[in-house]
Image: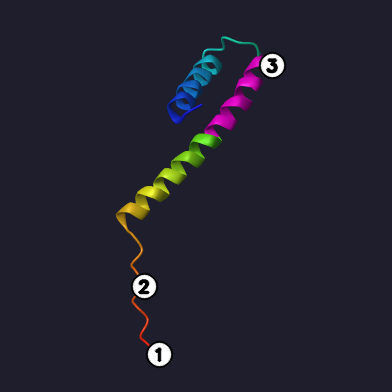
Amino acid sequence: MNFEQKMKRLEEIAAQIRESRVDFPEQLKLFREGSRLASEVEKELAEAEQIIQEIKDPEPEAPDSPPL
């Protein structure tokens, strides 16, 4: 499941729980699934943020060491 699919599924889960379309045991099951997806999405966002930061602020190159 890609990032967009995970976000869409999270929205579906939130709507189902919010609108009480399912019974309590099913809500718990959905909550577990949503928690897992939220963790995965959060990890992906953190990784993307790291990549963006590295692009914006690349580490300076080490100066050439002087000859011995």
Q: Which of the two labelled residues, at mark 3 and mark 2, occupies the earlier sequence position? A: 3
Along the line of sight, which residue is nearer the eye, 51 or 39? 51
Q: Range of the magenta residues?
A: 24-38
Expressed as whole percent of the image width and height from the top left, the position of residue 20 reads 56, 12
Residue 23 part of the magenta segment: no
Residue at 41% x, 44% y: name it. 48
In the displayed orientation, state which residue is furthest to the top. Answer: 21
Amino acid type, mark 2: Ala
Mark 3 or 2, which is nearer the eye? 2
Q: Is residue 1 above or below residue 20?
A: below
Q: Which of the two labelled residues, at mark 3 and mark 1, occupies the earlier sequence position? A: 3
Amino acid type, mark 3: Pro
Query: Residue under circle 2?
Result: 62
Secondary structure of residue under mark 3:
helix
Q: Are marks 3 and 2 in contact (CB under 8 Å)?
A: no
Secondary structure of residue under mark 2:
loop
**Label ID, residue 20:** none
| Distance from Cα at disc 3 to Cα at disc 2 | 58 Å
Query: Residue under circle 1?
Result: 68
Q: Main secondary structure of the magenta part?
A: helix
**Label ID, residue 25:** 3
